[in-house]
Amino acid sequence: MIVEIKKDRERGVIEYLEKTKEVKVSFPDKEIEKKIKKYLTSKKEYWRATDAKLIGFEEIIKMYPYENEDSFKGALLELFGRFGIWVDWDTKR
């Protein structure tokens, strides 16, 4: 999966290879590029409901965003709140 990203007037690309679990980030501002790469390759905590009908039945799971495509997409959604990075989903390929 490849998506374009942008912040202010700068544009870049994030590439995720699910088979090899590889994450590539290309962005003109190298400090931001490093932050994005670190964020997308660091272990995160997620809440998962164990029973959809009962409130309070959740568990915390820890995983890397690159473990599967759905987790990776979730991490991409958080980029704006963390770094002000827009993900252009229309460019997803």
Image (cartoon, rainbow, N blue to C red):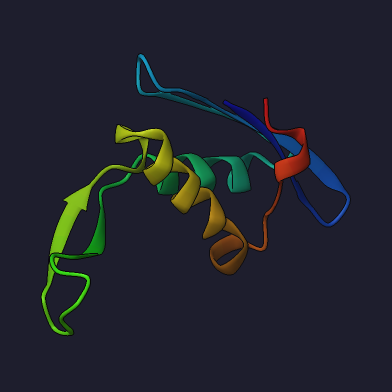
Side of 20 where 50 appears, left or right: left
Residue 12 sits in which quadrant? Answer: top right
Point out the residue furthest to the front here: 53
Side of 36 where 64 appears, left or right: left
In percent of width and height, residue 25 lies at: 58, 31
Up-down: is 20 above or below 6?
above
Residue 91 sits in which quadrant? Answer: top right
Point out the residue furthest to the top here: 20
Residue 47 sits in which quadrant? Answer: bottom left
In percent of width and height, residue 34 lies at: 52, 41
Q: Which of 76 and 34 is in front in this view?
A: 76
Q: Which of 31 and 44 is in front in this view?
A: 44
In percent of width and height, residue 85 lies at: 67, 55
Q: How many marks?
A: 0
Point out the residue furthest to the right here: 9
Side of 38 where 27 appears, left or right: right
Q: Nearer the viewer, residue 39 or 19?
A: 19
State the residue at coordinates (24%, 60%).
45
State the residue at coordinates (35%, 15%).
20
The C terminus - image quarter? top right
In percent of width and height, residue 79 lies at: 56, 57
The N terminus - image quarter? top right
Up-down: is 64 above or below 22?
below
State the residue at coordinates (88%, 50%).
9
State the residue at coordinates (52%, 60%).
78
